[in-house]
């Protein structure tokens, strides 16, 4: 029992590191001052492999550190919460639906479904945070500032959608390889 806990803790640390590295390695800058990255693949896989709680912590910590190391310190707290919730949603839905279907053919479909809900939360979370930051940064929290914040934040939605879709596709491709590890196979119920 203790060995399993140690293996899961080490795996969580590895997923946090992989999330951070994948987020920082390939960055495609966007006109909204953000960037598209491949870290969401590991955010989703964290929730799926480690479960919603441990996966949320690994995904949130790894994503938060990528913001800190990349100079996006003001985004780090929101990133921790948003990416942790993304992993938790995807992991919860995957485990709940996968155990109900219990066939390997449905595993990819369940990952896609969980990923869609998780990534939808990511898009919404960043939209709300960025709109609030823009409104707050204007110096006056009035209707015009909020409207301007919402308008500027909406420009980032398509880029976050692309990032989320790439994360889902890569997670679908990587999960079968990870499932060959006996512990991972056991944890995901393969």
Image (cartoon, rainbow, N blue to C red):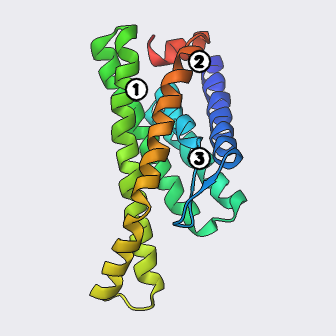
Question: Nearer the N terminus, badge 3 or badge 1?
Answer: 3
The reply to whether residue 50 is visible in this rendering is no
The percent position of residue 8, horizontal first and vertical second, equals 60, 26
Q: Answer left or right for 147 relative to 173.
A: left
Q: Are marks 1 and 2 in contact (CB under 8 Å)?
A: no
Reply above or below: 28 against 131: above
Residue that numbered label 1 is attached to = 111
> Which mark lies nearer to you, 3 or 1?
3
User: Where on the picture, by quarter, is residue 93?
Assistant: top left
Q: Nearer the viewer, residue 106 or 51?
A: 106
User: Where on the picture, by quarter, is residue 109?
Assistant: top left
The reply to whether residue 42 is visible in this rendering is yes
Name the residue rendered at 40%, 81% in the picture. Answer: 135
Name the residue rendered at 54%, 65% in the picture. Answer: 31
Secondary element under disc 3, as helix, strand or loop, is loop
State the mark number for residue 153.
none
Name the residue rendered at 65%, 51% in the picture. Answer: 27
The residue at the far bottom in this view is 140
Question: Nearer the N terminus, badge 2 or badge 3?
Answer: 3
Secondary element under disc 1, as helix, strand or loop, is helix
Name the residue rendered at 36%, 80% in the picture. Answer: 148
Reply above or below: 149 against 70: below
Reply above or below: 50 against 167: above
Residue that numbered label 3 is attached to = 37
């Amino acid at each position: 029992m203790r060995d399993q806990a140690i293996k899961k803790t080490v795996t969580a640390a590895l997923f946090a590191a992989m999330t951070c590295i994948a987020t920082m390695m390939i960055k495609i800058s966007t006109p909204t001052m953000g960037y598209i990255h491949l870290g969401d693949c590991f955010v989703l896989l964290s929730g799926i492999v480690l479960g919603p709680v441990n996966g949320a912590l690994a995904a949130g910590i790894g994503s938060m550190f990528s913001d800190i190391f990349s100079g996006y310190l003001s985004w780090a707290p929101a990133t921790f919460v948003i990416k942790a919730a993304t992993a938790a949603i995807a992991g919860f839905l995957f485990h709940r639906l996968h155990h109900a279907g219990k066939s390997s053919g449905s595993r990819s479909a369940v990952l896609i479904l969980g990923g869609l809900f998780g990534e939808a939360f990511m898009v919404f979370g960043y939209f709300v945070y960025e709109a609030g930051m823009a409104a707050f940064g204007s110096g006056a929290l009035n209707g015009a500032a909020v409207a301007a914040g919402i308008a500027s934040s909406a420009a980032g939605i398509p880029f976050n959608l692309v990032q989320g879709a790439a994360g889902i596709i890569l997670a679908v491709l990587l999960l079968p390889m990870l499932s060959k590890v006996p512990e991972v196979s056991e944890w995901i119920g393969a």
